[in-house]
Amino acid sequence: MGDRELTFVFDEALAQITRPHRFGEALTIELRQCLCQLGVPCEEFTPRADVIAQIWAKKRSLSFVA
């Protein structure tokens, strides 16, 4: 997968993780699996802010590769 496609996947993951949710709502298994494949390990109740920070860090690293 190229950097462009990977950036799109990170954007999709960010859209899912930042969608409106109830306070304390667990991350879905589908989202956790997707994040794990992207190298963003998380558990059911990992704070969304932590996951978002990890996604942004990975996405930023792609821009420095080019």
Image: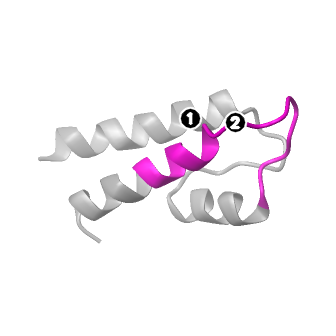
Q: Quadrant of residue 20?
A: top right
Residue plotted at (32% across, 36% down): 60
In the rendered structure, does residue 15 fall within the stretch colored magenta? Answer: yes
In the rendered structure, does residue 35 fall within the stretch colored magenta? Answer: no
Q: Is residue 44 left or right of residue 2?
A: right
Amino acid at dot 1: Ile
Residue plotted at (85% across, 29% down): 23
Mark 2 and mark 1 in contact? Answer it, CB < 8 Å: no
Amino acid at dot 2: Pro
Residue wearing tag 2 = 20
Q: Is residue 57 left or right of residue 14?
A: left
Residue plotted at (36% across, 42% down): 59
Residue that protrudes farthest toward the bottom in the picture: 1
Q: How many numbered marks have been drawn onto this rendered protein structure?
A: 2
Q: Secondary structure at mark 1?
A: helix
Residue that protrudes farthest toward the left in the picture: 66
Q: Is residue 25 left or right of residue 28?
A: right
Boundaries of the magenta span: 11-28
Q: Is residue 64 left or right of residue 40?
A: left
Q: Specify the principal SS of the magenta part.
A: loop
